[in-house]
Image (tube, grey):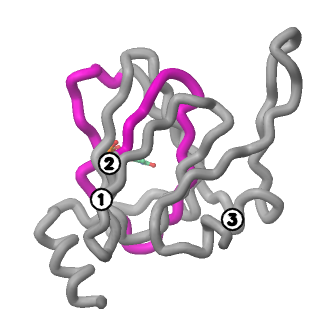
Amino acid sequence: MNVFSQKVPGIIEFPSIGSSAEGYISVAEYQKDIPFEIKRVYWTYFTPQNVIRGFHAHKELQQVIFAVSGKIVFKTEDGKGQVKVFTLDDPKVGLFIPPYVWREITFSHNAVLLCLASSEYTELDYIRKYEDFKKIVTHEE
Ligand code: TYD
């Protein structure tokens, strides 16, 4: 089944065009590779190795996230309480995160995270307290 139709996070491997002799290019195209319209792209960098970021879930936002450089580890918890750890350390590999997934993220010193997001930034879409997340997802089941 398609990763994007699931309500849980999942890995997507994008094709890489090229060779070790000339280098590679990977592409994510709306509709062909990504079913949601990409309304926002953001990237993070220079995150100290001892910092854990994230600690939130989203209500509507869908994301595909890449470690275009370095290594990024996502610990996710979906609405059913299933905890998974995803290690992104390959630029052709993306992580799809649907709504209602709590995430905690660590980075190697050289990590650059690139995110393709389905909507513009709004703080209203965030669930920033773990207790609120648990209340909402338990109520939804
Ligand atoms: P946040 O999503 O909380 O990042 P992380 O989970 O990695 O810690 O965002 C950090 C700050 O950046 C927060 O003040 C909101 C702001 N921000 C924007 O203004 N626009 C954006 O698109 C994003 C992703 C964050």
* Residue type for callout 1: Val
Q: Residue 51 appears at what percent x and percent y?
A: 22, 29
* Residue type for callout 3: Glu
Q: Which residue is mark 3?
A: 37
Q: Quadrant of the N terminus?
A: bottom right
Neighbour class for label 2 at 10 Å: few (<14), some, many (≥20)? some
Mark nearer the N terminus (2 vs 1): 2
Q: Quadrant of the C terminus?
A: bottom left
Q: Residue 133 appears at what percent x and percent y?
A: 21, 71
The yes-or-no answer for disc 1 within 8 Å of ligand 1 is: no
Nearer the observer, 49 or 15: 15
Q: Which residue is mark 2?
A: 75
Q: Residue 140 appears at what percent x and percent y?
A: 29, 89
**Does the magenta run of residues contain 54?**
yes
Q: Residue at x 26, y 70 (%)?
A: 81
* Residue type for callout 2: Lys
* The residue positioned farthest toward the left in the image shown: 131
Nearer the observer, 23 or 51: 23
Mark nearer the N terminus (2 vs 3): 3
Tell me where the magenta segment starts and ends, as one range.
Answer: 47-74
How far separated are the C-alphas under marks 1 and 3? Answer: 28 Å
Q: Residue 14 appears at what percent x and percent y?
A: 73, 44
- The image shows residue 109, relative to residue 11, as above or below, that is above
Q: Which mark is residue 83?
A: 1
